[in-house]
Amino acid sequence: MALVPLALPAAAVALDPAWLEPPAADALLAALLDDVEWEVHRIRLFGRAVDSPRRSCWIGDPHASYAYSGTRFTPHEWPGAMLPVRARLQDELGIDFNSVLANLYRDGRDRMGWHRDNERELGSRPVIASLSLGARRRFVFRRRDEPARKHAIVLGHGSLLLMAGDTQAAYQHALPATAKPVGPRINLTFRRIGPEARG
Ligand SMILES: [Mn+2]
């Protein structure tokens, strides 16, 4: 398969529904369920700190630290199972991703509300490569200047979603809860943290 651009005006989004073959995706999902230290992150919502409604882990090179709701996070070490994915992304996209926010949606109740991936360390036009493993879930975009119009896609096992250009500037995204009985989903969002965040 290959990355196919989505028709989202003012954004740069592309999807490869089968970036990883099912056996490779199965193996990576099983490894990461075991190997990642899944934590509850505190996030800011309307100015208040609340528990994020999913499990997460911040992973990256030692210098790729990250300020988040006033706290500076030192990244966890790369699990071995992620290294071939990082190398392949570098090879195919020419981007040296130095960090990953890994997210675990344990079942259909875990979710993420409307937000943008717009932390200052990412720069103004970040490239984010998002690999999905496990349960198929709906992922929704809405334009910030036209929030009533939503664009939903389905992110399945082994799919790769690329968000670049003005996607974060122009759109919010969300992963809604679902009442369907679904198993766990892991989402690896590869990012490049800029030098302004180092130190
Ligand atoms: Mn996000």
Image (tube, rainbow, N blue to C red):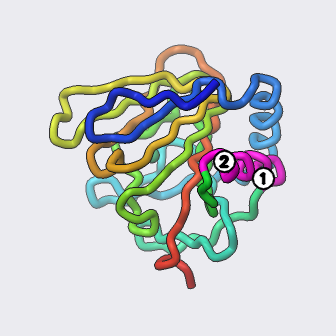
Q: Is residue 73 left or right of residue 164?
A: right
Q: Give how far across and how far down residue 21 sits, in percent.
A: 75, 25
* Disc 1 Cβ-to-ligand 1 distance below 8 Å: no
Residue at 50% x, 76% y: name it. Answer: 197
Checking the image for residue 83, the label placed there is 1
Residue at 62% x, 49% y: name it. Answer: 102
Q: Is residue 142 left or right of residue 148?
A: right
Q: Place residue 46 in its image quadrant.
A: bottom left
Viewer-proximal residue among 82 and 1: 1
Q: Is residue 27 left or right of residue 71?
A: right
Q: Amino acid at mark 2?
A: Leu
Residue at 45% x, 69% y: name it. Answer: 121
Q: Give how far across and how far down residue 64 sits, in percent.
A: 60, 71
Magenta-span inclusion, residue 81: yes
* Disc 2 Cβ-to-ligand 1 distance below 8 Å: no
Q: Give how far across and how far down residue 166 sits, in percent.
A: 32, 49
Please report the bounds of the magenta region as a residue range: 79-93
What SS does tag 2 mark?
Answer: helix
Q: Is residue 174 left or right of residue 179?
A: left
- For the view shown, which residue lies furthest in the top direction? 180
In the picture, which quadrant includes the N terminus? Answer: top right
Viewer-proximal residue among 160 and 111: 160
Checking the image for residue 89, the label placed there is 2
